[in-house]
């Protein structure tokens, strides 16, 4: 049982931006890619989607990057996961197009798994992006003039 | 977010056996394969595992098949899913061997997703196999002398 890589990376992009809120320079894709050790091209698609959904504001060109459009405390994690996880068909018979099971119209498995999934999401509905990261600007300044020193460091001493 | 096909089929084998409890002939793999439209070879591995775990009793030869080893009301669905779902690494950073994220030691995502997964499983812990199927022997008699008539039919009139 796994969340998709898309959800995983979406949450990380948002967490990175939340952890750097208040920093002068906006966050760059290169910085996030290096911080998490994941591909730039994958991240670009995620940032594009988050921007289209009004969660990130992006600016182009030198000195550009991305910032959260709303305070982290206003971004609900349950809502983000509902948006990024498109496949909540926990078992084959949830999907009427591919269902081969001749018993499904009588079966109670679907409603039981549906309730379990609601319990999962309800737990996430109680969490905001702000709950996932240390409070205040917690990441060191973005690198200038290159990415070689772009390793992310949490500022020591801040609560985690 | 999906359960594995292994879990899906395991639950269906158990449900089929529960729905035919009290029937004279034990359930055959061919019958289950036809009932759900899934492969015999896949089912055989699942039945073997369920037998090794003390949930199914199997008998070989003509007239052989499988039966539940315990009453359906004693088989907990949460316990079955914990047994069949081996990958509860909801996101990459749950797996220390493959984790690339440099922030994971400070991150609260893991504990939040872990709590959500506990809520999911807790819901299933409240359900037994008996809750998933109509009470009493609900499936028509197994086919004799071949599989051509082996389509599963719930006996009309029984509660579903």
Image (cartoon, coloured by chain):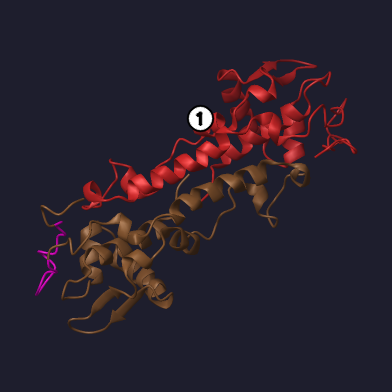
Chain colours: A brown, B red
User: Is A149 a magenta residue?
Assistant: yes
Counting from the top left corner in percent of width and height, residue A71 is at: 32, 70
- Magenta highlight range: A141-154
Residue identifier under label 1: B83
Q: Is residue A13 magenta?
A: no
Left or right of A39? Residue B69 is right
Q: Is residue A113 above or below residue A77?
A: above
The one nearer the camera, A133 or B62, is: A133
| Position of A152 relative to B88 (above/below) | below
| Quarter of the rendering containing residue A15 | bottom left
Location of residue B131 in the rendering, given as x and y in whole percent from the top left corner: 69, 33
Chain designation of label 1? B
Q: Residue at x 15, y 56 (%)?
A: A154
> Which residue extends farthest right?
B157
Q: What element does badge 1 sit on?
A: helix
Asked whether residue B29 appears in the rendered view, the answer is no
């Amino acid at each position: 049982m796994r969340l998709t890589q898309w959800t995983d990376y979406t949450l990380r992009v948002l967490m990175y931006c939340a952890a750097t809120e208040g920093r002068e320079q906006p966050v760059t894709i290169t910085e996030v890619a290096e911080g998490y050790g994941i591909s730039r091209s994958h991240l670009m698609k995620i940032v594009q989607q988050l921007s289209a959904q009004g969660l990130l504001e992006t600016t182009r060109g030198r000195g550009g990057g991305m910032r959260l459009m709303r305070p982290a405390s206003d971004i609900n994690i349950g809502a983000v996961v509902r948006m990024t996880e498109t496949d909540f068909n926990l078992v084959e018979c949830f999907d009427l197009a591919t269902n081969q099971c001749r018993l499904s119209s009588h079966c109670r498995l679907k409603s039981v798994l549906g309730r379990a999934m609601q319990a999962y999401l309800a737990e996430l509905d109680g969490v905001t992006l702000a709950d996932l990261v240390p409070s205040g600007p917690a990441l060191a300044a973005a690198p200038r003039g290159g990415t070689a020193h772009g390793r992310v460091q949490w500022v020591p001493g801040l609560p985690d």
